[in-house]
Image: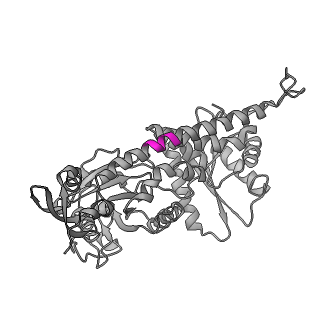
Amino acid sequence: MIEVREKPKMVERAFLVGVRMVEESAEFIDSLLDELAELVGTLRIGCVGRTVAKIRESRPRFLLGSGKVEEILQEARDLRADCLVFDAELTPAQQRNWEKATGLCVIDRQEIILDIFSERAQTREAVLQVALARAEHSLPRLKNAWTHLSRQRGGGVAQRGEGEAQIELDSRMVRQRISRLKRELEAVVRHRHTQRKLRERVPLPTAAIVGYTNAGKSTLLNALTGAHVLAEDKLFATLDPTTRQLPLEGGRKILLTDTVGFVQRLPHQLVDAFKATLEEAVVADYLIHVLDASHPEVTRHAETTLSVLKELGAADKHIITVYNKVDQIPLEDRPLRAGKGGSAQEGFGTNGRPDVFYVSARSGQGLGCLASRLDDLIRGSVEVAEFFIPHDRYEIVARLHAAGAVRHEKAKSKGVHIVGSVPERMRETLEPYRVTG
Protein backbone atom coordinates (compact mmCIF):
# COMPACT_ATOMS: atom_id res chain seq x y z
CA MET A 1 0.00 0.00 0.00
CA ILE A 2 1.33 3.45 -0.95
CA GLU A 3 1.20 5.95 1.89
CA VAL A 4 1.80 9.68 1.86
CA ARG A 5 5.03 9.18 3.78
CA GLU A 6 6.42 7.23 6.66
CA LYS A 7 5.49 9.08 9.81
CA PRO A 8 8.05 8.88 12.60
CA LYS A 9 7.29 5.82 14.70
CA MET A 10 7.88 7.61 17.99
CA VAL A 11 5.88 10.83 17.63
CA GLU A 12 5.28 11.76 21.26
CA ARG A 13 5.30 15.55 21.55
CA ALA A 14 2.86 17.50 19.40
CA PHE A 15 2.63 21.26 19.05
CA LEU A 16 -0.85 22.39 18.02
CA VAL A 17 -1.41 25.24 15.56
CA GLY A 18 -4.81 26.87 15.22
CA VAL A 19 -5.65 29.23 12.36
CA ARG A 20 -8.16 31.98 13.06
CA MET A 21 -9.78 33.94 10.28
CA VAL A 22 -10.75 37.51 11.14
CA GLU A 23 -14.47 36.67 11.23
CA GLU A 24 -13.98 33.83 13.73
CA SER A 25 -14.06 34.32 17.49
CA ALA A 26 -11.15 33.47 19.75
CA GLU A 27 -13.46 31.28 21.86
CA PHE A 28 -14.46 29.20 18.83
CA ILE A 29 -10.84 28.58 17.81
CA ASP A 30 -9.91 27.69 21.40
CA SER A 31 -12.73 25.12 21.48
CA LEU A 32 -11.44 23.62 18.23
CA LEU A 33 -7.93 23.38 19.67
CA ASP A 34 -9.31 21.74 22.82
CA GLU A 35 -11.00 19.17 20.63
CA LEU A 36 -7.85 18.72 18.54
CA ALA A 37 -5.90 18.07 21.75
CA GLU A 38 -8.43 15.34 22.61
CA LEU A 39 -8.07 13.85 19.14
CA VAL A 40 -4.27 13.85 19.39
CA GLY A 41 -4.46 12.37 22.89
CA THR A 42 -6.63 9.58 21.51
CA LEU A 43 -3.56 8.54 19.49
CA ARG A 44 -1.52 8.55 22.70
CA ILE A 45 0.46 11.64 21.65
CA GLY A 46 1.10 14.33 24.22
CA CYS A 47 0.50 18.03 23.48
CA VAL A 48 3.44 20.19 24.62
CA GLY A 49 2.05 23.52 23.48
CA ARG A 50 -0.33 25.40 21.22
CA THR A 51 -0.62 28.68 19.39
CA VAL A 52 -3.19 30.51 17.30
CA ALA A 53 -2.32 32.41 14.13
CA LYS A 54 -4.79 35.11 13.08
CA ILE A 55 -4.90 35.72 9.34
CA ARG A 56 -6.97 37.71 6.86
CA GLU A 57 -6.33 35.37 3.95
CA SER A 58 -4.40 32.16 3.42
CA ARG A 59 -0.93 32.24 1.87
CA PRO A 60 -0.18 29.67 -0.83
CA ARG A 61 3.26 28.61 0.49
CA PHE A 62 2.73 28.08 4.24
CA LEU A 63 -0.90 29.16 4.75
CA LEU A 64 0.56 31.70 7.21
CA GLY A 65 2.89 34.64 6.81
CA SER A 66 6.67 34.13 7.02
CA GLY A 67 6.92 35.94 10.36
CA LYS A 68 4.41 33.61 12.01
CA VAL A 69 6.17 30.62 10.46
CA GLU A 70 9.43 31.59 12.19
CA GLU A 71 7.62 32.22 15.45
CA ILE A 72 5.95 28.79 15.39
CA LEU A 73 9.19 27.08 14.41
CA GLN A 74 11.07 28.65 17.31
CA GLU A 75 8.35 27.87 19.85
CA ALA A 76 8.13 24.24 18.69
CA ARG A 77 11.91 23.87 18.98
CA ASP A 78 11.95 25.41 22.46
CA LEU A 79 9.33 22.87 23.57
CA ARG A 80 11.21 20.02 21.83
CA ALA A 81 8.14 19.09 19.80
CA ASP A 82 8.60 16.36 17.22
CA CYS A 83 5.35 17.03 15.36
CA LEU A 84 3.24 20.03 14.27
CA VAL A 85 -0.50 19.42 14.12
CA PHE A 86 -2.60 22.03 12.29
CA ASP A 87 -6.28 22.47 12.99
CA ALA A 88 -6.67 23.85 9.47
CA GLU A 89 -6.57 21.76 6.32
CA LEU A 90 -3.17 21.97 4.63
CA THR A 91 -2.69 21.51 0.91
CA PRO A 92 -0.13 18.87 -0.12
CA ALA A 93 2.28 21.64 -1.15
CA GLN A 94 1.89 23.50 2.16
CA GLN A 95 2.48 20.27 4.06
CA ARG A 96 5.71 19.64 2.16
CA ASN A 97 6.88 23.22 2.65
CA TRP A 98 6.33 23.06 6.40
CA GLU A 99 8.22 19.78 6.70
CA LYS A 100 11.15 21.14 4.70
CA ALA A 101 11.25 24.31 6.79
CA THR A 102 10.95 22.63 10.20
CA GLY A 103 12.39 19.16 9.74
CA LEU A 104 9.40 17.91 11.77
CA CYS A 105 6.47 15.67 10.99
CA VAL A 106 3.61 17.98 9.95
CA ILE A 107 0.01 16.77 9.82
CA ASP A 108 -3.45 18.31 9.99
CA ARG A 109 -6.77 17.48 11.64
CA GLN A 110 -7.82 15.31 8.72
CA GLU A 111 -4.87 12.96 9.10
CA ILE A 112 -5.39 12.73 12.86
CA ILE A 113 -9.01 11.66 12.36
CA LEU A 114 -8.02 9.21 9.63
CA ASP A 115 -5.45 7.63 11.97
CA ILE A 116 -8.03 7.31 14.75
CA PHE A 117 -10.54 5.72 12.40
CA SER A 118 -7.85 3.33 11.18
CA GLU A 119 -7.22 2.18 14.76
CA ARG A 120 -10.91 1.82 15.63
CA ALA A 121 -12.30 0.14 12.51
CA GLN A 122 -13.41 -3.41 13.30
CA THR A 123 -15.91 -4.66 10.74
CA ARG A 124 -15.11 -5.30 7.09
CA GLU A 125 -17.20 -2.30 6.05
CA ALA A 126 -15.46 0.11 8.42
CA VAL A 127 -12.01 -1.15 7.39
CA LEU A 128 -12.85 -0.62 3.72
CA GLN A 129 -14.32 2.83 4.36
CA VAL A 130 -11.21 3.95 6.23
CA ALA A 131 -8.88 2.52 3.60
CA LEU A 132 -10.80 4.32 0.86
CA ALA A 133 -10.69 7.64 2.71
CA ARG A 134 -6.97 7.24 3.36
CA ALA A 135 -6.22 6.38 -0.28
CA GLU A 136 -8.18 9.39 -1.54
CA HIS A 137 -6.38 11.59 0.98
CA SER A 138 -2.99 10.19 -0.06
CA LEU A 139 -3.32 10.50 -3.82
CA PRO A 140 -2.55 14.24 -4.15
CA ARG A 141 0.27 13.92 -1.59
CA LEU A 142 2.34 11.26 -3.33
CA LYS A 143 5.19 13.66 -4.10
CA ASN A 144 5.84 13.79 -0.40
CA ALA A 145 6.51 10.06 -0.38
CA TRP A 146 9.46 10.19 -2.74
CA THR A 147 12.73 12.09 -2.68
CA HIS A 148 13.75 10.46 -5.96
CA LEU A 149 11.77 11.11 -9.12
CA SER A 150 14.22 9.44 -11.49
CA ARG A 151 12.92 7.81 -14.64
CA GLN A 152 12.75 4.06 -15.03
CA ARG A 153 13.96 2.64 -18.30
CA GLY A 154 11.17 1.25 -20.41
CA GLY A 155 11.45 -1.84 -22.58
CA GLY A 156 8.54 -2.07 -25.03
CA VAL A 157 7.49 0.07 -27.95
CA ALA A 158 4.26 0.89 -26.13
CA GLN A 159 6.23 2.36 -23.22
CA ARG A 160 7.87 5.74 -23.09
CA GLY A 161 11.45 5.69 -24.23
CA GLU A 162 12.45 7.62 -21.13
CA GLY A 163 10.41 5.34 -18.90
CA GLU A 164 7.81 6.54 -16.40
CA ALA A 165 8.40 8.60 -13.31
CA GLN A 166 8.06 6.58 -10.11
CA ILE A 167 5.36 8.95 -8.93
CA GLU A 168 3.29 8.21 -12.04
CA LEU A 169 3.48 4.51 -11.32
CA ASP A 170 2.46 5.11 -7.72
CA SER A 171 -0.40 7.37 -8.75
CA ARG A 172 -1.69 4.63 -11.01
CA MET A 173 -1.39 2.08 -8.18
CA VAL A 174 -3.33 4.31 -5.78
CA ARG A 175 -6.06 4.98 -8.35
CA GLN A 176 -6.36 1.26 -8.98
CA ARG A 177 -6.56 0.68 -5.23
CA ILE A 178 -9.30 3.31 -4.92
CA SER A 179 -11.30 1.61 -7.68
CA ARG A 180 -10.86 -1.80 -6.05
CA LEU A 181 -11.88 -0.49 -2.62
CA LYS A 182 -14.99 1.12 -4.06
CA ARG A 183 -16.00 -2.17 -5.70
CA GLU A 184 -15.44 -4.10 -2.48
CA LEU A 185 -17.34 -1.49 -0.48
CA GLU A 186 -20.25 -1.65 -2.92
CA ALA A 187 -20.44 -5.42 -2.32
CA VAL A 188 -20.48 -4.89 1.46
CA VAL A 189 -23.14 -2.19 1.12
CA ARG A 190 -25.30 -4.56 -0.96
CA HIS A 191 -24.98 -7.08 1.89
CA ARG A 192 -26.06 -4.38 4.37
CA HIS A 193 -29.07 -3.60 2.19
CA THR A 194 -29.97 -7.28 2.23
CA GLN A 195 -29.76 -7.30 6.02
CA ARG A 196 -31.95 -4.21 6.17
CA LYS A 197 -34.55 -5.82 3.92
CA LEU A 198 -34.62 -8.84 6.21
CA ARG A 199 -35.23 -6.51 9.16
CA GLU A 200 -38.00 -4.79 7.22
CA ARG A 201 -39.76 -8.12 6.77
CA VAL A 202 -40.54 -7.75 10.45
CA PRO A 203 -42.21 -4.33 10.15
CA LEU A 204 -40.69 -2.62 13.16
CA PRO A 205 -40.20 1.15 13.20
CA THR A 206 -36.59 2.28 13.40
CA ALA A 207 -34.72 5.07 15.13
CA ALA A 208 -31.08 6.03 14.54
CA ILE A 209 -29.08 7.40 17.47
CA VAL A 210 -26.97 10.25 16.13
CA GLY A 211 -24.86 12.95 17.68
CA TYR A 212 -21.46 14.37 18.40
CA THR A 213 -18.69 11.95 19.23
CA ASN A 214 -18.44 11.06 22.93
CA ALA A 215 -21.95 12.34 23.66
CA GLY A 216 -22.98 8.94 25.04
CA LYS A 217 -24.79 7.34 22.09
CA SER A 218 -23.49 3.82 22.71
CA THR A 219 -24.13 4.16 26.45
CA LEU A 220 -27.71 5.19 25.68
CA LEU A 221 -28.21 2.19 23.38
CA ASN A 222 -26.83 -0.13 26.07
CA ALA A 223 -29.02 1.40 28.77
CA LEU A 224 -32.23 1.21 26.73
CA THR A 225 -31.78 -2.22 25.15
CA GLY A 226 -29.34 -4.09 27.37
CA ALA A 227 -26.81 -4.26 24.53
CA HIS A 228 -23.10 -4.54 25.19
CA VAL A 229 -21.71 -2.07 22.66
CA LEU A 230 -18.27 -0.64 23.51
CA ALA A 231 -18.87 2.62 25.36
CA GLU A 232 -15.83 4.53 26.60
CA ASP A 233 -15.13 8.12 27.54
CA LYS A 234 -13.10 8.90 24.43
CA LEU A 235 -13.62 10.20 20.93
CA PHE A 236 -14.83 7.73 18.29
CA ALA A 237 -14.99 4.82 20.75
CA THR A 238 -16.96 2.86 18.16
CA LEU A 239 -17.31 3.28 14.41
CA ASP A 240 -19.56 0.41 13.42
CA PRO A 241 -23.36 0.75 13.56
CA THR A 242 -25.14 -1.63 15.92
CA THR A 243 -28.89 -2.34 15.84
CA ARG A 244 -30.83 -3.64 18.84
CA GLN A 245 -34.53 -4.11 19.61
CA LEU A 246 -36.25 -2.05 22.31
CA PRO A 247 -39.52 -3.46 23.71
CA LEU A 248 -42.10 -0.78 24.55
CA GLU A 249 -45.43 -0.67 26.32
CA GLY A 250 -48.34 -2.61 24.90
CA GLY A 251 -46.07 -5.13 23.18
CA ARG A 252 -44.81 -2.60 20.65
CA LYS A 253 -41.13 -2.62 19.63
CA ILE A 254 -38.65 -0.35 17.89
CA LEU A 255 -35.20 -0.98 16.40
CA LEU A 256 -32.48 1.39 17.66
CA THR A 257 -29.26 1.83 15.69
CA ASP A 258 -26.11 3.40 17.13
CA THR A 259 -24.14 5.34 14.49
CA VAL A 260 -20.65 6.84 14.20
CA GLY A 261 -20.21 10.15 16.01
CA PHE A 262 -19.75 13.50 14.30
CA VAL A 263 -16.99 16.01 14.88
CA GLN A 264 -16.31 19.56 13.79
CA ARG A 265 -14.44 19.81 10.49
CA LEU A 266 -14.95 16.15 9.70
CA PRO A 267 -12.85 15.34 6.60
CA HIS A 268 -14.98 15.30 3.47
CA GLN A 269 -13.40 11.99 2.47
CA LEU A 270 -14.86 10.45 5.62
CA VAL A 271 -18.29 11.99 5.12
CA ASP A 272 -18.39 10.42 1.65
CA ALA A 273 -16.76 7.13 2.66
CA PHE A 274 -19.03 6.66 5.68
CA LYS A 275 -22.30 7.42 3.92
CA ALA A 276 -22.93 3.68 3.79
CA THR A 277 -22.74 3.64 7.58
CA LEU A 278 -24.52 6.93 8.13
CA GLU A 279 -27.36 6.03 5.76
CA GLU A 280 -28.87 4.20 8.74
CA ALA A 281 -29.84 7.73 9.79
CA VAL A 282 -31.27 8.45 6.33
CA VAL A 283 -33.57 5.42 6.23
CA ALA A 284 -34.66 5.50 9.90
CA ASP A 285 -38.18 6.56 10.82
CA TYR A 286 -36.92 8.72 13.69
CA LEU A 287 -33.65 10.26 14.84
CA ILE A 288 -32.54 10.42 18.47
CA HIS A 289 -30.08 13.31 18.61
CA VAL A 290 -27.85 12.84 21.67
CA LEU A 291 -26.02 15.82 23.14
CA ASP A 292 -23.53 16.02 26.01
CA ALA A 293 -25.31 18.45 28.32
CA SER A 294 -22.15 18.90 30.41
CA HIS A 295 -20.01 20.09 27.48
CA PRO A 296 -19.46 23.87 27.23
CA GLU A 297 -19.80 23.71 23.42
CA VAL A 298 -23.04 21.70 23.43
CA THR A 299 -24.83 24.25 21.22
CA ARG A 300 -22.09 24.19 18.61
CA HIS A 301 -22.03 20.39 18.74
CA ALA A 302 -25.76 20.37 17.98
CA GLU A 303 -25.21 22.67 15.00
CA THR A 304 -22.43 20.42 13.67
CA THR A 305 -24.58 17.29 13.86
CA LEU A 306 -27.57 18.97 12.23
CA SER A 307 -25.30 20.28 9.47
CA VAL A 308 -24.00 16.78 8.68
CA LEU A 309 -27.55 15.37 8.78
CA LYS A 310 -28.59 18.05 6.30
CA GLU A 311 -25.69 17.05 4.04
CA LEU A 312 -26.87 13.44 4.21
CA GLY A 313 -30.45 14.42 3.41
CA ALA A 314 -31.77 13.35 6.80
CA ALA A 315 -32.48 16.71 8.45
CA ASP A 316 -36.23 16.51 7.74
CA LYS A 317 -36.66 13.39 9.90
CA HIS A 318 -38.63 13.51 13.14
CA ILE A 319 -35.87 14.35 15.65
CA ILE A 320 -35.97 13.67 19.40
CA THR A 321 -33.31 15.72 21.18
CA VAL A 322 -31.74 14.03 24.21
CA TYR A 323 -29.44 15.96 26.54
CA ASN A 324 -27.30 13.27 28.15
CA LYS A 325 -24.94 13.38 31.16
CA VAL A 326 -27.11 15.84 33.10
CA ASP A 327 -25.97 14.13 36.28
CA GLN A 328 -22.58 15.78 35.68
CA ILE A 329 -23.88 19.36 35.88
CA PRO A 330 -25.55 21.27 38.75
CA LEU A 331 -29.33 21.46 38.69
CA GLU A 332 -29.28 25.27 38.32
CA ASP A 333 -27.15 24.99 35.17
CA ARG A 334 -29.52 22.72 33.29
CA PRO A 335 -31.03 24.56 30.34
CA LEU A 336 -34.64 23.58 31.08
CA ARG A 337 -36.52 22.64 34.20
CA ALA A 338 -38.74 19.63 34.55
CA GLY A 339 -42.12 19.74 32.95
CA LYS A 340 -44.31 17.15 31.31
CA GLY A 341 -43.14 13.66 32.20
CA GLY A 342 -40.24 14.65 34.42
CA SER A 343 -39.22 15.09 38.01
CA ALA A 344 -38.87 18.66 39.26
CA GLN A 345 -36.37 17.55 41.87
CA GLU A 346 -34.10 15.86 39.35
CA GLY A 347 -34.63 18.42 36.60
CA PHE A 348 -35.61 15.85 33.95
CA GLY A 349 -38.47 16.19 31.54
CA THR A 350 -39.51 18.26 28.60
CA ASN A 351 -40.99 21.51 29.94
CA GLY A 352 -43.93 21.07 27.62
CA ARG A 353 -41.66 20.20 24.68
CA PRO A 354 -42.25 16.48 24.11
CA ASP A 355 -39.22 15.98 21.91
CA VAL A 356 -36.55 17.39 24.25
CA PHE A 357 -35.39 15.15 27.11
CA TYR A 358 -32.79 15.41 29.86
CA VAL A 359 -31.34 12.05 30.87
CA SER A 360 -28.36 10.24 32.29
CA ALA A 361 -27.73 7.11 30.26
CA ARG A 362 -25.20 5.93 32.82
CA SER A 363 -27.52 6.15 35.84
CA GLY A 364 -30.75 5.49 33.95
CA GLN A 365 -32.48 8.66 35.07
CA GLY A 366 -35.00 10.03 32.61
CA LEU A 367 -34.88 7.01 30.28
CA GLY A 368 -38.45 5.98 31.11
CA CYS A 369 -39.78 9.29 29.78
CA LEU A 370 -37.78 8.85 26.58
CA ALA A 371 -39.08 5.30 26.04
CA SER A 372 -42.65 6.49 26.66
CA ARG A 373 -42.25 9.18 24.04
CA LEU A 374 -41.01 6.64 21.51
CA ASP A 375 -44.06 4.53 22.30
CA ASP A 376 -46.34 7.56 21.81
CA LEU A 377 -44.78 8.27 18.42
CA ILE A 378 -45.23 4.70 17.23
CA ARG A 379 -48.79 4.47 18.53
CA GLY A 380 -49.67 7.79 16.90
CA SER A 381 -48.20 6.84 13.54
CA VAL A 382 -50.37 3.77 13.01
CA GLU A 383 -54.07 3.32 12.37
CA VAL A 384 -56.27 0.66 13.94
CA ALA A 385 -58.19 -1.48 11.48
CA GLU A 386 -59.77 -4.92 10.97
CA PHE A 387 -58.35 -7.58 8.68
CA PHE A 388 -59.30 -11.05 7.55
CA ILE A 389 -56.20 -12.98 6.56
CA PRO A 390 -56.48 -16.43 4.90
CA HIS A 391 -54.67 -19.33 6.50
CA ASP A 392 -52.33 -19.65 3.52
CA ARG A 393 -51.01 -16.13 4.29
CA TYR A 394 -50.33 -16.80 7.95
CA GLU A 395 -46.84 -15.30 7.58
CA ILE A 396 -48.58 -11.91 7.58
CA VAL A 397 -50.14 -12.71 10.94
CA ALA A 398 -46.72 -13.73 12.24
CA ARG A 399 -45.23 -10.43 11.08
CA LEU A 400 -48.00 -8.48 12.83
CA HIS A 401 -47.34 -10.38 16.05
CA ALA A 402 -43.60 -9.73 15.76
CA ALA A 403 -44.33 -6.02 15.43
CA GLY A 404 -46.62 -6.04 18.46
CA ALA A 405 -49.45 -4.79 16.25
CA VAL A 406 -52.18 -7.33 17.12
CA ARG A 407 -54.86 -6.13 19.55
CA HIS A 408 -57.44 -8.87 19.02
CA GLU A 409 -57.27 -12.14 17.09
CA LYS A 410 -59.90 -14.79 16.37
CA ALA A 411 -59.37 -17.90 14.27
CA LYS A 412 -62.13 -18.85 11.82
CA SER A 413 -62.58 -21.68 9.37
CA LYS A 414 -61.16 -19.86 6.37
CA GLY A 415 -58.73 -17.54 8.03
CA VAL A 416 -57.89 -15.26 10.95
CA HIS A 417 -59.84 -12.16 11.94
CA ILE A 418 -57.50 -9.53 13.40
CA VAL A 419 -57.99 -6.12 14.94
CA GLY A 420 -54.72 -4.30 15.13
CA SER A 421 -52.58 -1.33 14.33
CA VAL A 422 -51.18 -1.03 10.82
CA PRO A 423 -47.43 -0.51 10.65
CA GLU A 424 -46.61 1.91 7.85
CA ARG A 425 -44.30 -0.59 6.20
CA MET A 426 -47.13 -3.16 5.97
CA ARG A 427 -49.96 -0.94 4.75
CA GLU A 428 -49.61 -2.00 1.13
CA THR A 429 -49.37 -5.68 2.08
CA LEU A 430 -52.41 -5.53 4.39
CA GLU A 431 -54.72 -3.45 2.19
CA PRO A 432 -56.17 -6.44 0.25
CA TYR A 433 -57.22 -8.06 3.54
CA ARG A 434 -58.86 -5.02 5.12
CA VAL A 435 -62.44 -5.51 6.43
CA THR A 436 -64.66 -2.59 5.43
CA GLY A 437 -68.19 -1.71 6.27
User: What quarter of the picture does the C terminus occupy?
Assistant: bottom left
Looking at the image, which residue sits at the far front? Answer: 414
Q: How is the image coloured?
A: one colour
Q: Nearer the viewer, residue 170 or 324?
A: 170
Identify whether 163 is placed above or below 99: above
Residue at 19%, 58% in the rendered image: 389
Residue at 85%, 23% in the rendered image: 154
Q: Quadrant of residue 252?
A: bottom left
Asked if the stretch drawn in magenta spans residue 240, the answer is no
Residue at 51%, 43% in the rendered image: 117
Q: Position of residue 322 (x, y in %)?
A: 34, 65
Q: Which residues are magenta?
A: 186-191
Q: Is residue 12 visible?
A: no
Q: Quadrant of residue 177?
A: top right
Looking at the image, which residue sits at the far bottom? Answer: 352
Q: Nearer the viewer, residue 312 or 61?
A: 312
Q: Is residue 89 left or right of residue 196?
A: right
Q: Nearer the viewer, residue 22 or 6?
A: 6
Residue at 35%, 44% in the rendered image: 230
Q: Is residue 421 left or right of residue 65?
A: left
Q: Position of residue 19 (x, y in %)?
A: 66, 59
Looking at the image, which residue sits at the far top? Answer: 155
Q: Is residue 388 left or right of residue 380?
A: left
Name the magenta segment's main secondary structure: helix
